Image (cartoon, rainbow, N blue to C red):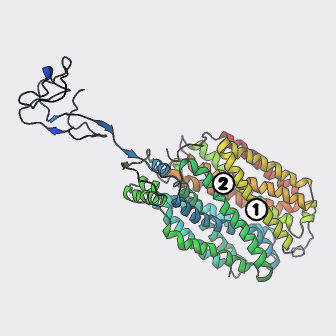
Amino acid sequence: MKPRRVGMARGYEEMDGANVPRPPGSTVSVGGAANGADSLSGGASSPQSPVSPPVGSMLAGAAPEFELASVSVVPDDTYTVTQAVNALGFGWFQVKLSLCVGLCWMADSMEMTILSVLGPALHCDWGISRYQQALVTTVVFLGMMLSSTFWGHLSDRYGRKPALTLCGVLLFLYGLLSSVAPSFGWLLLLRGLVGFAIGCVPQSVTLYAEFLPTKQRAKCVVLLDCFWALGACFEVALALAVTPTLGWRWLLGLSAAPLFIFAIITPWLPESARYHVTSGQNDKALNTLEQIAKDNRRPMLLGRLVVEGPSGSRGSLKALLGSSLRRTTLLLWFIWMSCAFCYYGLVLMSTELFGGKNKTIVDGALTDDGITIDCQPLATTDYMDLLWTTLAEFPGIFATIYVIEKFGRKKTMALQFLFYAGCVLMITVTEVRVFLTIILFMARGVIAGLFQAAYVYTPEVYPTALRSVGVGGCSALARLGAMATPYIAQVLFQSSIWSAVTVYGIFAACASVACMLLPYETRGADLAH
């Protein structure tokens, strides 16, 4: 072994005895001296067996300052956040986080589901037109689209937790104020502000995914949709109990209750350890990882926490369109836009089909000339059918959990888009309410699972430094699709059911092709690269 020069020990640890000061005037021993002498010029004898060094192994000239006795060289013990999260596993910490993020997801679902009930109620109460009904939905998604990138930048620069805390407070405030809006104009403004705050909700999925082990990540993120489905079912049940007697104002006010609870618990949310490491706050990241180890009853990793790969440009929308991510970003933007367009379109079409004029709509005939003549509030049977179709999201979630791990993210999303296209086209071939309910049940389950599959894939494909702004950008494009869908599901659907469902079928088929064109399959891959 050649003796290591001073200053060349970076990245290694040496055991006791590796750096032993040599008495003045003594020479260096390398592996043992000839004829059984371990040290020269006054050195003490060694009990080890003599080993004759090869010719030229002895150093001549300058004498080193250390004696290399019993040298042991081992790699420096380091680990990344991904390795720590995988080692600490899934436990009580993730269960608590699931409940907190799930409540946020549930509140978001309630604010979205209420749109399918609010439009018909306002049509009867204030006599608004079909275009104005569509505008009530559009303005919410407009606020979401305008704010998505803003929330992404805020989360990447200041952390996920502060952004979600502000989101919870604003959502509760604007949701409650919407219930006392004095006019249609004020209602549009307040619902737009609700949409602006909702634009931060996808960041909760980013925070959640960053604390999940690789093996459980896809299943847990998809299971998060259970809270979305629960919120949608709860909103339909609340509408059934409140709207016929107390009216839509009480419905809006009571729907803000989960937002109030979420705003209270946000201070106890953990901040992303990956965000702390990327921003140079390793001490805070270690504290979070130690809390995970404590909650999960696992031993904390020993060693030094390091950044996993170069951080690149933090929080930059321009970086999403760089040469390495341009194709992925553009395809994901179209996939998310199509997904939201199809999902919310189906929700709004369900209300139109189950409404008081559903037979006229199915036959494709025009409604009567007056605006208020067709005002028929949803009956109990209509709410029950809406509840059944909403419950379809649960089997859709569990089916997605199985398929997404067996066939991968890309193939799963592609197949689900194709299945959705087939279901919506079948709406035109039957007028029987039972068959319509079954078709809508299948389509709702598929599109709900598809939305969650997109939420699984997107955080996985972007690096840590761009993850929030990447999810935020996709969310913004999704809102663009959701903004357009009311004019298909509520306006065009009234005049031509065939034209409306054909539009949804074409978008779903094109999105299926886009899924297969994605360059990366992230099944089994670590979250950060």
Please give the name of the residue rendered at 49% of the width and 70% of the height, measured from the top-left corner: 267
The reply to whether residue 496 is visible in this rendering is no
User: Which x, y percent locates residue 228?
Assistant: 67, 62
Please give the name of the residue rendered at 21% of the width and 29% of the height, measured from the top-left corner: 3
**Left or right: where 355 falls relative to 256:** right
- The residue wearing badge 2 is 452
Please give the name of the residue rendered at 92% of the width and 56% of the height, measured from the top-left corner: 430
- The residue wearing badge 1 is 391
User: Which x, y percent locates residue 67?
Assistant: 16, 34
Q: Callout 2: 10 Å neighbours few (<14), some, many (20+)?
A: many
Identify which amino acid the numbered label 2 is placed on: Gln
User: Which x, y percent locates residue 427?
Assistant: 87, 55
**Left or right: where 348 falls relative to 300:** right
**N-terminal label among 2 and 1:** 1
Identify which amino acid the numbered label 1 is placed on: Leu
The reply to whether residue 98 is visible in this rendering is yes
Image position of 380 with respect to 341: above or below: below
User: Which x, y percent locates residue 39?
Assistant: 11, 28
Instruction: Verify CB contact (< 8 Å) between mark 2 and mark 1.
Output: no
Q: In which quarter of the image is the N terminus?
A: top left
- 3D distance between C-alphas at marks 2 and 1: 16 Å
